[in-house]
């Protein structure tokens, strides 16, 4: 964490050195003045309500901590550091400090921090399921004043699950959508067209496989990475309109789920580099040894940063199934409800700046994201300039809460059970029906325990 | 094994110490009382450290095991012995305990056995012996994470180099799925763990081997013993206390092993390599069932305590034999 902070300092080169901590005198000054400004709030415009308390009180900048996995993600980290550099250049009152862990460890560590008392940050990013959990645990501060101050209109409906008691608790800072991202060079060389049906998809992936040099598709599956496996496996139910749970009832023995896992097994046997971890697979993809992945749109940015040879060849195909349903995950940025009031105000000031139309458009373009939190947040010219976007835009959005029912609150636990039994199918030779029947029993027991 | 002069020396030292103690008691009692506080002062930092970082967390963990707390959802509630009832009914707990025992026994046999063989080799006189001794200790010095990364690549079913060797075995026509196969995953993890640990035991056993007086072996040879008989009747009894100590230590280390198992298989495929420690982590930090994870932790603590007691008994018995 310290290392990333140092990197941030080196990258951002703030116009004024960030002060690490407030003196007691500064703190009292800020606290007293914040109270006074709060009392005078009705007299101030709403835009200044968010920003002024810090600016007016102290000559020293206030450092707030933003916790995210973004700092570890190639491409996205550069985009965010550039945005923060711009933010620092735009004012002298607030400095943003980086904190966090890589994606796979992020949820665990946040939950452990919550268990230990509070999240050690003023701002933090969330996966959809973590956001639900944080909302339930009252870790997020309401931020509808930010929406108003930033002039956001028509906030996407995907934010609905972040609303509680007429308050909004998070703003999406990256929406990722699953799609079929393929290497057009490898497809052309093998004479394979982008698939339009599941059968074509399987046939194409098989034709593109020539072990051990080339593989038709990759999806995470190694036992040591159940989180990554579950993250993508959820999408494999989409070809058959499957849902993993309805309300408090697990649905893993339903026909669509069984068919989805059978499809995964077919691809695993025919076209995947078995036993390969995600990091190695990503490198193989960058070297043109893997032809396609069912992967989220945000991953494209990783290839732009780490795979300069493969990036120009990347294209996306519409989901090769009739409904075109595809999982779309929003990742809200939230203000820590347990942070000091001044830090919450500063966090909101940053969010207000970030979500203002021009800055937000910059963020999306720098991060190579394609789905905005509100319609005016993205420029059509930018979208038109991306050759790999068509397949992603063709997908019909389905959110994790749609497919996980009440188990969205226990997504990790649910996934762990499913993935354990998936492995008995992939390597243990068990029929999918038997494995999922066992999983269903364990999931029902989980439901009884957590929903009692 | 000790020769007579050592015993005599020890007796003399004890006698002198007793004499000195009597003198101190008679002549300098007040100073002695002051001076005797020094050991307590010296022990104080470690006692505070252990209290804060070991005993309080253990007590907190025990307290957590009597609550219901799924991290990040709802409030913590006192549930009495509910988690322990669940523990005894939980087939996966007993499964992980069985997995732990299998892993532990196999690692102890393989690591201490390989350590013994390597120690016997290193105890021979040959050219470049120093170099070989250095090279043989390398696995132990490698950190866990790079070790696991290297093995994951070596064992990759698609392009791992281990497949070249495996395919030389008659009847093997497909690349083995080392870490994915339900039958191969555990032996593979055991082999990696033993490979990583054996140099430590090898070095300890080598030190014991070098402590055997050459006269004993020489006498056995003069009496007509062949090399195997020398090993069986002289070498092995001489190093037996060290071997038993190493076996208990290896059992404790294997029981606590987390990083190697977690990084190679995460406890999978399915749960075939999920030892108690890995299950504890998966329950608390992958399923976020903190209270039940704490209950598993208490169970693990009791088992570990058993091994530690055995270790202490073995060690004190060895000290008595040495004396």
Image (cartoon, helix red, strand yellow):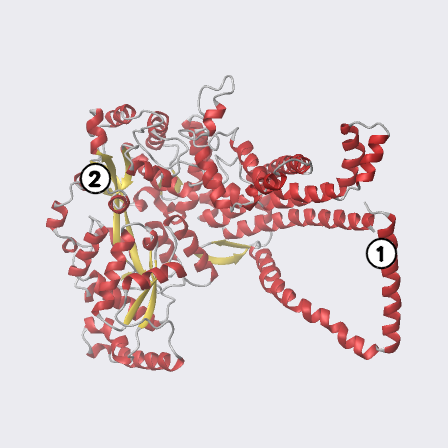
B305 on left or right of A326: right
> What element does badge 1 sit on?
helix
Residue pictured at 37% horizontal, 76% vertical:
A22
Write down the quadrant of residue A100 in the picture: bottom left
Q: Nearer the viewer, residue A161 or B61?
A: B61
> What element does badge 2 sit on?
loop
Q: Residue B314: where, in percent of width, then height?
A: 75, 46
Residue pictured at 59% horizontal, 41% vertical:
B131
Q: Residues within 10 Å of mark 2 (few under 14, many from 20)?
A: many
Q: How many marks?
A: 2
Q: Which mark is residue A395?
A: 2
Residue that mark 1 sits on: B10
Q: Residue A268: where, in percent of width, then height?
A: 36, 29
Q: Nearer the viewer, residue A288 or A144?
A: A288
Q: Residue A202: where, in percent of width, then height?
A: 28, 26
Residue pictured at 44% horizontal, 56% vertical:
B74
Q: Nearer the viewer, residue A404 or A60?
A: A60
Image vertical order of residue B74 relative to residue A87, above or below: above
* Residue B190 seen in the figure: yes
Residue pictured at 85% horizontal, 69% vertical:
B21
Residue at the top extreme, as displayed: B171
Residue at the front extreme, as displayed: B127
């Amino acid at each position: 964490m310290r290392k990333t902070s140092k990197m941030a300092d080196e990258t951002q080169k703030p116009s004024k050195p960030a002060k690490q901590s407030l003196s007691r005198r500064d703190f009292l000054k800020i606290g007293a003045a914040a109270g006074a400004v709060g009392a005078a709030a009705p007299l101030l415009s709403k835009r200044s309500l968010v920003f002024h308390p810090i600016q007016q009180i102290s000559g020293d900048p206030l450092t707030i901590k933003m916790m995210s996995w973004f700092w570890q993600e190639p491409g996205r980290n550069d985009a965010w550091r550039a945005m923060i550099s711009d933010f620092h250049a735009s004012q002298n009152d607030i400095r943003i400090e980086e904190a966090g862990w890589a994606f796979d460890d992020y949820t665990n560590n946040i939950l452990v921090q919550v268990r230990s008392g509070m999240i050690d940050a003023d701002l933090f990013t969330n996966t959809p399921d973590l956001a639900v959990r944080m909302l339930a645990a009252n870790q997020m501060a309401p931020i509808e004043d930010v929406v108003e101050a930033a002039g956001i209109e028509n906030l996407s409906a995907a934010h609905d699950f972040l609303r509680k008691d007429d308050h909004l608790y998070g703003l999406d800072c990256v929406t990722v959508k699953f799609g079929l991202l393929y290497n057009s060079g490898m497809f052309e060389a093998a004479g394979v067209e982008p698939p339009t049906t599941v059968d074509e998809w399987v046939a194409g992936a098989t034709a593109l496989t020539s072990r051990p040099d080339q593989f038709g598709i990759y999806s995470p599956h190694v036992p040591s990475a159940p989180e990554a496996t579950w993250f993508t496996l959820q999408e494999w139910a989409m070809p058959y309109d499957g849902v993993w749970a309805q309300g408090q009832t697990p649905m893993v023995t339903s026909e669509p789920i069984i068919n989805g896992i059978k499809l995964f097994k077919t691809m695993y046997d025919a076209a995947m580099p078995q036993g390969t971890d995600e990091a190695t697979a990503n490198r193989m993809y960058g070297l043109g040894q893997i032809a396609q992945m069912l992967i989220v749109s945000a991953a494209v940015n990783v290839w732009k940063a780490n795979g300069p040879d493969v990036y120009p060849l990347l294209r996306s195909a519409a989901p090769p199934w009739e409904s075109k349903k595809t999982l779309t995950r929003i990742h809200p940025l939230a203000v820590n409800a347990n942070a000091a009031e001044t830090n919450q105000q500063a966090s909101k000031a940053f969010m207000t700046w970030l979500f203002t139309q021009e800055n937000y458009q910059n963020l999306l373009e720098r991060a190579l994201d394609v789905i905005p939190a509100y319609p005016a947040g993205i420029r059509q010219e930018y979208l038109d300039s991306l050759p790999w976007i068509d397949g992603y835009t063709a997908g019909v959005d389905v959110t994790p809460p749609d497919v996980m029912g009440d188990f969205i609150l226990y997504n990790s636990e649910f996934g762990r059970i499913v993935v354990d039994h998936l492995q008995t199918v992939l390597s243990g030779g068990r029929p999918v029906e038997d494995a999922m029947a066992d999983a269903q029993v364990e999931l029902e027991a989980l439901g009884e325990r957590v929903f009692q | 094994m000790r020769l007579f002069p050592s015993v005599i020396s020890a007796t003399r030292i004890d006698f002198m110490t007793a004499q000195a103690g009597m003198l101190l008691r008679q002549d300098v009692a007040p100073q002695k009382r002051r001076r005797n506080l020094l050991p307590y002062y010296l022990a104080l930092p470690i006692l505070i450290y252990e209290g804060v970082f070991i005993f309080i967390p253990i007590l907190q963990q025990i307290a957590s095991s009597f609550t219901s707390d799924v991290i990040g959802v709802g409030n913590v509630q006192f549930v009495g012995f509910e988690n322990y009832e669940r523990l005894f009914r939980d087939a996966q707990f007993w499964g992980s305990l069985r997995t732990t025992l299998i892993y532990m026994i196999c690692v102890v046999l393989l690591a201490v056995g390989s350590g013994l063989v390597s120690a016997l080799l290193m105890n021979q006189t040959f050219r470049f012996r120093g170099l070989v001794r250095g090279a043989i200790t390398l696995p132990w010095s490698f950190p866990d994470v790079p070790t696991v990364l290297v093995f994951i690549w070596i064992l990759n079913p698609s392009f791992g180099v281990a497949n070249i060797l495996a395919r030389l075995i008659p009847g093997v026509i497909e690349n083995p799925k080392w870490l994915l196969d339900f039958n191969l995953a555990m032996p593979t993890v055991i082999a990696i763990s033993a490979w990583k640990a054996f140099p430590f035991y090898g070095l300890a056993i080598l030190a014991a081997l070098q402590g055997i007086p050459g006269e004993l072996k020489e006498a056995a040879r003069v009496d007509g013993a062949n090399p195997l008989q020398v090993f069986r009747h002289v070498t092995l009894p001489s190093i037996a206390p060290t071997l038993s100590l190493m076996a208990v230590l290896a059992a404790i280390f294997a029981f606590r092993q987390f990083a190697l198992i977690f990084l190679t298989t995460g406890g999978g495929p399915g749960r075939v390599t999920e030892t108690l420690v890995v299950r504890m982590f998966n329950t608390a930090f992958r399923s976020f069932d903190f209270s039940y994870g704490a209950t598993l932790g208490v169970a693990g603590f009791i088992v570990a305590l058993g091994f530690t007691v055995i270790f202490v008994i073995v060690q004190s018995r060895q000290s008595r034999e040495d004396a």
